[in-house]
Image (cartoon, rainbow, N blue to C red):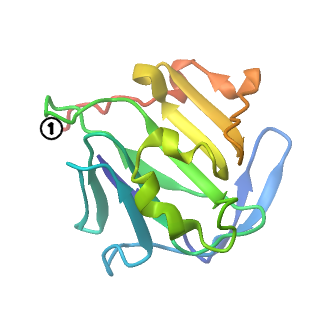
Amino acid sequence: MLISLAYSQKEKKVIINDTLLAKATLIFEENLENGLDNWKVEQMPGGRVSSIDEKLEITDVAGCTIWFKKKLEGPIMIQYDAFVIDEGGPQDRVSDLNCFWMAKDPENPDNLFVNSEKRGGKFSNYDGLRLYYMGVGGHDNTKTRFRRYVGNGDRPLLREHDLSESKYLISRALEMI
């Protein structure tokens, strides 16, 4: 999996929906020229995360979470491009691009990373955090879901945040000539 991350400090107008326009000041741009200095990796054994050609490359076997270390507050918009590799390799699978943000560990509210080793990238180990979650292409690329984890293991799912139309799933890239 390759992920290219981009944030910027330029102000721009962003169309949220048919009736809402927001002025956004983007606050951070990541080109990975310093490798993974701004990131904390939690990964199950057998996987690998690296910075290659200013992209974050993730090869995963059993679970991986990569946290941006800087604390972000207030209304934010996060933009990135993700490319899921499906070329017949042992870890290739078009499914489960999960995103967590604005996380807090109720056991350690001042330091999210105290329990990094304990969580270790295993998806179910994040249930006890308070955070926002988006799971794109879950259940073998049949569902995209938005949730707010409340910090006690509950992960309520509103019906309108359980999406299965193809426009909300991971699309397979066309072969480039």
Question: Residue at the right extreme?
Answer: 19
In the rendered image, the vertical position of residue 70 relative to residue 153, given as above or below: below
Q: Residues within 10 Å of mark 1 (few under 14, many from 20)?
A: few
- Residue in the picture at 40% in, 50% down: 121
Q: Is residue 77 left or right of residue 125?
A: right
Q: Where in the figure is residue 70, as x and y percent of width and height?
A: 57, 75
**Residue toward you, 14 or 42:** 42
Q: Where in the figure is residue 105, as x and y percent of width and height?
A: 64, 60
| Mark 1, residue position | 177
**Residue toward you, 130 or 132:** 130
Q: Where in the figure is residue 24, as x and y percent of width and height?
A: 72, 66
**Residue toward you, 89 or 153:** 153
- Quarter holding the C terminus? top left
In the rendered image, the vertical position of residue 87 relative to residue 17, given as above or below: above
Q: Is residue 153 left or right of residue 40?
A: right
Q: Could you tell me if residue 82 is visible in this image? A: yes
Q: Where in the figure is residue 81, as x and y percent of width and height?
A: 43, 51
Figure disc tally? 1
In the rendered image, the vertical position of residue 63 relative to residue 174, given as above or below: below
- Residue in the picture at 34% in, 53% down: 43
Tell me the element at label 1. Answer: loop
Q: What's the amino acid at mark 1?
A: Ile
Q: Could you tell me if residue 5 is visible in this image? A: no
- Residue in the picture at 71% in, 48% down: 151
